[in-house]
Amino acid sequence: MKAYLNDGLVRLAEARVSIFDHGFLYGDGVYETMRVYDGVVFMLEEHLKRLSHSAAMILLDLPKTVDGLKSAIYDTLDANGFRDAYLRLAVTRGEGPIGLDPALCKRPTLVIYCDKLKPPPLSFKEQGMKLAIVNTKRNCKEALDPQIKSLNFLNNILAKAESLRAGADEGLMLNMEGHVAEGTTSNIFFVHGGALCTPASECGILKGITRDVVISIAGRLHMKLAEGKFTASQLLDASEAFVTSSIIEIMPVGKIGDARFKPGEVTKALMAEYAKEVQAYVKETKESGPSIWGAS
Ligand code: PMP
């Protein structure tokens, strides 16, 4: 297997980053996780747009243009021969002396890694994932804006560890005001009072790309959407709930603490439409030729 490191492909065993890389020293960097379907990176433009935004927010110049990153992504996929894959692209501040000044690092480090997709347990789709509302609060957006998809993931790691200790698959974080925010690597949706509800971005969440796709599908299906501030008790009172991410797509929630849910009609309708959306995207991307899907 091969990974892309800075200027080209290297064997995985030889892909090494310096102990002075500020990504390692301080979690100083940004990343994206993408899903590949039949050789096509789903929502590639949106992921690269978010990466550029994250990089700009931390005053980091990306080491390649968007087209250069696309080529590197597809080179990595081609080198590994994966059609359905998980793909992670990270850019760190780079190697430099100890110290927090971003100017200490002259050249960012680029790493692209892909692997075969491991399907989630069947029980997730059939019975739904188990969630736990954790005590760890989503870090407040005024301190570290969750729109920066940063390598500094301790907030989420602590929340995940807490959820695992509670016997759950995913931890759900509230924000400092006590409103529902998001999962450790997912956004949350639920059906309450006849509307499809999801925390608004001012709740301090990462605006997931899958979340945006779901919101646009819900619009097409004429579902009533409520983006807002919700309490945990409103969530626990929901008739159905699901979480979203690029990797798990739309995944029904079966339990939140002691509250139980069944994958309902809204969740099923959105899952079916999401699958169609992916198919259409892959078809269109392939038809529009190699320059758009990155091989140029
Ligand atoms: N929130 C957080 C904290 C995440 O890490 C992720 C996964 N990237 C998401 C939400 C879902 O985002 P997306 O749909 O873009 O994968």
Image (tube, rainbow, N blue to C red):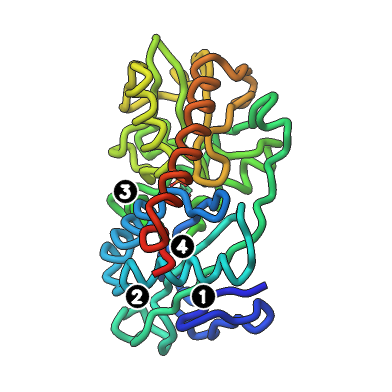
Q: N-terminal of the two: label 4 or label 3?
A: 3
Give the label, 2 or 4, closer to the camera: 2
Q: CA distance from mark 4 to mark 3?
A: 14 Å
Q: N-terminal of the two: label 3 or label 2?
A: 2
Q: Position of residue 146 (x, y in %)?
A: 37, 50
Tell me which amino acid carries mark 3.
Lys
| Label 1 Cα crowd, 10 Å radius (few <14 / some 14-19 / many 20+) | some
Q: CA distance from mark 2 to mark 1?
A: 21 Å
Tell me which amino acid carries mark 1.
Phe
Q: CA distance from mark 3 to mark 2?
A: 28 Å
The residue wearing badge 3 is: 141
Residue at 44% across, 36% down: 174
Q: N-terminal of the two: label 2 or label 4?
A: 2
| Label 4 Cα crowd, 10 Å radius (few <14 / some 14-19 / many 20+) | some
| Element class at badge 3 | loop
Q: Position of residue 39 (x, y in %)?
A: 55, 55
Give the label, 3 or 2, closer to the camera: 2
Q: N-terminal of the two: label 2 or label 1?
A: 1
| Element class at badge 4 | loop
The residue wearing badge 4 is: 152
Tell me which amino acid carries mark 4.
Asn
| Element class at badge 2 | loop
The residue wearing badge 2 is: 64
Q: Position of residue 186 (x, y in %)?
A: 50, 41
Quadrant that contains the C terminus: bottom left
Query: What mark, if any, has residue 24 been given in the picture?
Result: 1
Q: Nearer the viewer, residue 32 or 278?
A: 278
Q: CA distance from mark 4 to mark 1?
A: 10 Å
Q: Are marks 4 and 1 in contact (CB under 8 Å)?
A: no
Residue 181 vertical position relative to residue 15 in the rendered view, above or below: above
Indicate left or right for 17 with 94 as reference: right
| Label 2 Cα crowd, 10 Å radius (few <14 / some 14-19 / many 20+) | some
